[in-house]
Image: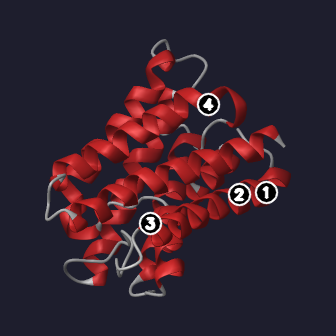
Amino acid sequence: MKKYIAEFIGTFAMVFCGTGAIIINQETNGSIGHAGIAITFGLIVIAMIYAFGHVSGAHINPAVTIGFWITKRFTGKEILPYICMQFLGGIVASLLLKYLFPNNINLGATFPAGSELQSFILETTLSFILMLVILYSTEESNHVNHFAGLTIGGTVLLEAMFAGPICGASMNPARSLAPALVSGNFTSLWVYITAPVLGVVLASLVRRMRII
């Protein structure tokens, strides 16, 4: 149960702080800014990895959980409990944000700025890169794995910084589903559910086949 609780809290914190930054930026007429939002997402991911990495692996992302299973670094019987706790943590975070900011319409949900295809390709590519970083930086043989939290969080920050204005740079089905579900706005949600999973699966296959 400790692992499941860690995934719940980790995903809760990520959604609460990350989408919370978007909401507060809207509520305060841009006081945080796009860069501040990207930094918030990166920092909370770093914090949760170092806080709970030794407990649950700090996946805080259903797509990442699937990727670890594909690469045989995670057991199949724990996939469903992990994913359920991740989604639940995100939903509780969005519910709390809805209570705190009842007039905010979208609660930090992700939407394409252009076409859905454009965002689908972006989200797939971003998730592919992120999963490669996660897999290679967390290997036991990697001499820099003590800095994995910084590496992974830094990648989230980087991708959110440059791609966020176009696709939202979700890379995480739980991060996108939670605010969509609580706000009731499911516009283009399929992009943010399928693209991260596809990107992660492709990266995991690259690792499993030892292409690099």
Q: Which residue is mark 3?
A: 100
- The mark found on residue 85 in the picture is 2
In three-dimensional space, the C-alpha distance between marks 1 and 3, rounded to whole angstroms, equals 29 Å
Q: At which x and y percent is residue 40? A: 32, 44
Q: Are marks 4 and 2 in contact (CB under 8 Å)?
A: no
Quadrant for the N terminus in the image = top right
Drawn side of residue 181 relative to residue 126, left or right: right
Q: At which x and y percent is residue 140? A: 61, 19
Element type at mark 2: helix
How many C-alpha atoms fall within 10 Å of the one at disc 4: few (<14), some, or many (≥20)? some
Residue 158 vertical position relative to residue 25 in the rendered view, above or below = above
In three-dimensional space, the C-alpha distance between marks 1 and 4, rounded to whole angstroms, equals 17 Å
Q: Which residue is mark 4?
A: 53
How many C-alpha atoms fall within 10 Å of the one at disc 3: few (<14), some, or many (≥20)? few
Q: At which x and y percent is residue 201? A: 55, 57
The mark nearer the N terminus, 4 or 2, is: 4
Drawn side of residue 7 relative to residue 161, left or right: right
The mark nearer the N terminus, 2 or 3, is: 2
Drawn side of residue 24 relative to residue 57, left or right: left
Locate residue 89: give its quadrant: bottom right
Q: Amino acid at mark 3?
A: Leu
Depth order, front residue of 127/85? 85
Q: Amino acid at mark 2?
A: Met
Say which residue appears at 73% left-offset and 53% top-offset. Answer: 82
In three-dimensional space, the C-alpha distance between marks 4 and 2, rounded to whole angstroms, equals 16 Å
In front: mark 1 or mark 3? 3
Q: Are marks 1 and 2 in contact (CB under 8 Å)?
A: yes
